[in-house]
Every structure is written in structure tokens, then in C-alpha cells.
Amino acid sequence: MKPGKRNLITDVPGLKVGNASDDRLKSGVSVLLGDAPFTAAVHVMGGAPGTRETDLLAPDRLVQEVDALVLSGGSAFGLDAASGVADGLRAMGRGFAVGDARVPIVPGAILFDLLNGGDKAWADNPYKPLGRAALDAAGTAFALGSTGAGCGATTQDLKGGLGSASVVMENGITVGALVAVNALGSVIQQGRPNFWAAPYEMDDEFGGLGMAADWQPGHEPDPAAHVDTGGNTTIAIVATDARLTQAEATRLATAAHDGMARAIVPSHTPFDGDLVFAAATGARPLPDPTWDPLRLGHAAALCLARAIARGVHAAQPAPGDTHPTWQARFRGP
């Protein structure tokens, strides 16, 4: 396996990503948009999720495809970002047909970034216009780090961020991941610059440091001693051009959580709303329907682990930050 051309989720043909941020707010929105509706699923492992329209993604529901997926900051306020995306899609004439009406299907998830040093004294919820702006910005190239839903994200000891990665499998199928890293846990090994995701790194994409030479398993600090109510929840999307049913996409989302657990210690805590969406465009049939779903799940987990490290590695400092960036802490000014 090797990274795709951009090493972004948009290496999956037919997908675009748009980001919108408000630096004063220290928050933002990320949108995954398909050129056409796509199969989607979700799996939640965190104890404090915040979601919109995820019940529609169960395999036994009427609607089998969605128009877009939304990741947003803002806690419960951020759920309104999907309304802005739905408005924009409706203006494009997109949505699930119900008679003469079109209803855009836009599931979303949020992270908690209300205590990250940004100005949250808004009179009107800012997330609906941010959602519309993110949709309008959708394209195949986008920045990582302190942008979109990762604009004001934090981890236990560093500023978080928006990450992405991709891989092209031996059978020609592409898999990608997009993630807003805002975890209670840490992405680095016992305070060192080395990332937990180091064993899965490709082409020195987040520094090429490998595992810490003096790392000792079992010597991690007590996670309960570092609970930070200022920001929790990592939300992600894994995507592929494979043709999957909703049930198979659900299994893909489930398997991708392995990547989150490899890259964040601890992950899936009662204080995080950790969640993974899966998206499948259906452009390529599975060459091996028996074993390729297993390979897809493994590839999605690897992509997600790498994307998490890339998001933190790329974070940029901003006035009022409550956490240092990886670059500032380990590379200096």
C-alpha cells in the first residue's frame, strides 16, 4: 500500500472537502461532499457523542445514501452547521426525492471546543453560516492543522487539528480518512515528540521520528489525572471508492476505530464522543467480496491513525491558545 497522490481523503475519486473557520471564535466546520450521493454509515465508541441524523445510517432505514457529512466544533451549537450545508445543497437541487420535494440528507457530528480561549459570546449561532461557507469551499485540495472543525481543537497536552491521509491498496481501491482531533487523551508518547501512530507513518508525513527509544509500555501517566473539560471528542470520516452496502460500510467505520485507539492514548473515554463515519462512493466493485472487506477495514484504521498524527503535527499557533502546538513545543519558534 502507498499514499494517494494528495495523501488526503479526496484521493477517493468523487469526493471533495470544504473547510470554514473563525479564528476569533477558535472553531469551524468541515464538510465531506460527494459529486453524487454516497453510501454512509456510522459507529460511535465514545461516551459523550453529539450527532445529527445518524439514526438514518442504520442498514434497515429507508434512506441508503447521503449528500454530505459534516464535522463541526461548537458542541451542541455546532449541530446547526449541517443546516447551512442542507440549505446550500437544496439550492443546488440536491437531496432525497419525496414527490416534488428534495430533502438533503446531511448527517453530522460535533466536538466540544467551547473552552479553548476563543470568543464564544455570540448573539446568533455562527455555525449555520460556517456550514454553508464550508460547503461553498469544497474542493479536492485543502489545508491540515488549525482549520475547519480542527480550528480550535485540543488534546491532553497539545493543540489538536484537522488531519487527513489516504492509501491505495494493492487491488486498486483507494481509502482515505478525515479527522478533527480534539481528544482527552494524548497523541504523543509520554511527553516526547514521538507520535503513537509512528509505526504506521508513510513517507515521514508527520516528522519521521519513529517510536521513542526510551518508551516503556505501561508507564503512561494516569489518564484520570489529566482530564481536561476544556475539550474532548475526536470525530472522523473514512471513505473509499469501493462498492459497499450500508452494513459493510458500518463494519468499515467500526474497524477504523482501531486506528483511533492506536493514535490516541487513551481513546473512547466516557468524556469523549469519539465517532467514525464511513463513506463509500461505489465506483469500484470488490475484487474479492470475501476478504476485501477485511482489507478495507485494516486500511481505514491505518489511514485514520496517520491522519490523527498529521492533524496535530500541522497545527498552527494563534493568539489566546490554551495549548502549545506540536511544532512550537518540539521544534521551537
Image (cartoon, rainbow, N blue to C red):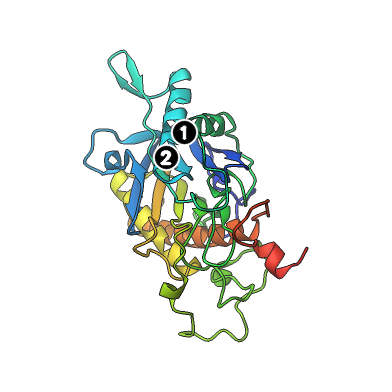
Give the number of the disc on residue 77: 2
Q: Secondary structure at mark 2?
A: helix
Q: Whole-percent x and y of residue 27?
A: 55, 44
The local secondary structure at tag 1 comes to loop
Mark 1 vs mark 2: which is more N-terminal?
A: 2
Residue 144 in the image, given as x and y percentages of width and height? 62, 50
In the rendered structure, the answer to whether residue 93 lies left or right of residue 118 reads left
Q: Please, is residue 237 above or below residue 94 in the view?
A: below
Mark 2 Cα-neighbour bin, 10 Å: few <14, some 14–19, many ≥20: some
Could you tell me which quadrant the N terminus lies in? Answer: bottom right
Residue in the image at 59% along x and 64% along y: 158
Amino acid tagged 1: Asn
The CA span between labels 1 and 2 is 7 Å
Whether residue 285 can be seen here: no
Q: Is residue 23 left or right of residue 83?
A: right
Q: In the figure, residue 159 lies in which quadrant?
A: bottom right
Extreme residue toward the left, this view: 60
Is the residue under label 2 in contact with that under label 1 (CB below 8 Å)? yes
Q: How many marks?
A: 2
The amino acid beneath tag 2 is Phe
**In screen coordinates, is 14 left or right of 103?**
right
Q: Can you give x and y, in whole percent of width and height, for residue 54 in the image?
A: 31, 42
Which residue is nearer to you in this view: 56 or 51? 51
Residue at the spot of label 1: 125
Q: Residue 89, image x and y in percent?
A: 45, 25
Q: Nearer the viewer, residue 222 or 64?
A: 222
Q: Residue at coordinates 62% horizontally, 76% vertically from top-left?
A: 192
Q: Residues within 10 Å of mark 1 (few under 14, many from 20)?
A: some
Q: Residue at x 45, y 49 (%)?
A: 237
